[in-house]
Image (cartoon, grey):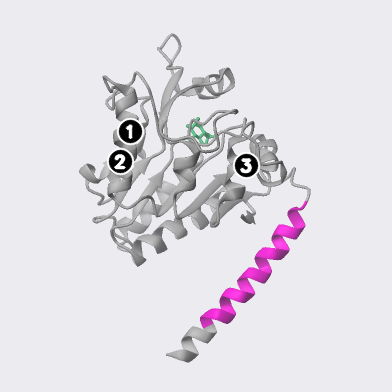
Amino acid sequence: MQIVILKDAASVAEYGANIFIEQVNKKADSVLGLATGSTPVALYQELIKANQSGQVSFAESISFNLDEYLGLDGSHQQSYRYFMNEQLFNHIDIKQENTHVPPGDAQNPVDACLEYESAMANKGGVDVQLLGIGRNGHIGFNEPSSGLRSRTRVKTLTKETIDDNARFFSEGEYQPHLSITMGIGTILEAKKIVLLATGENKADAVRDMVEGPLAAICPASALQLHQDAVIVIDEAAASKLAHGEFYKHIESENQKLQSYLAELASQAK
Ligand code: GLP
């Protein structure tokens, strides 16, 4: 894992957004894996700015979101489809038909999961997957004890996740306790993974993901198996890491290597 520790949430968003902008500029028809939650919102704002200023175009891009509440259709204000339209899709030049969110209103959710997997495979799989992390270490809606090779499926939410997300629902409003989520095995197939975490309330989960054992009890620890996972965090989210200084040292060495390689490439031209 590449651990990038930055001073604040704004720098995390900018760093993460640049990875997506570079990816799409390199391959216009990139398949982007997208996420919901409050953490990616600032990154989406960076993408909107970059798109509106002509720095990047998503006209050929394809997206697949990680998860959706089961029981909410896309017009419901708490659905993740609604969230994505509001926070990103309505403000950039991506074609709505190229955006995919698991269908929370599927009549047969089990078939819908299989179809979602096939749709991703038909597009050649995800090039870059964006992730947040739950306080309990979940990614997507893969709650603790999720199989490390799990595929897109119906998942029951923990009480902790339901409570954490209750802030988005008004009092008395129906809040789903089931979801459709890409599995951990599905997520691990993305060619690159970018996980963002900010704030002190994520520090325990970040520590367990990076320095804890590989274990289903912390689903995000599965990223230890991935060959190109970048963990972008602010100082607060990094505050419980035992080896934070070492990760910063690796990063500075990494940057020197990148500049050396860039210099080599320019000499070869
Ligand atoms: C939800 C989503 C996750 C997200 C998590 C953290 O449960 N299913 O994909 O990573 O919340 O959200 P936040 O960024 O708001 O802390």
Q: Residue at x 70, y 58 (%)?
A: 247
**Which quadrant would residue 133 be assigned to in this image?**
top right
Q: Is residue 246 magenta?
A: yes
Q: Residue at x 32, y 53 (%)?
A: 124
**Which amino acid type is shown beneath numbered disc 1?**
Leu
Residue located beneath label 3 in the image: 221
Q: Mark 3 or mark 1, which is nearer the start of the sequence?
A: 1
Q: Is residue 170 visible?
A: yes
Residue located beneath label 2 in the image: 118
Q: Nearer the viewer, residue 75 or 72?
A: 72
Q: Is residue 102 magenta?
A: no
Q: Position of residue 2 (x, y in %)?
A: 61, 57
Q: Secondary structure at mark 1?
A: helix
Q: Position of residue 10 (x, y in %)?
A: 54, 50
The span picked out in magenta is: 243-262
Disc number at residue 114? 1
Q: Position of residue 75 (x, y in %)?
A: 27, 25
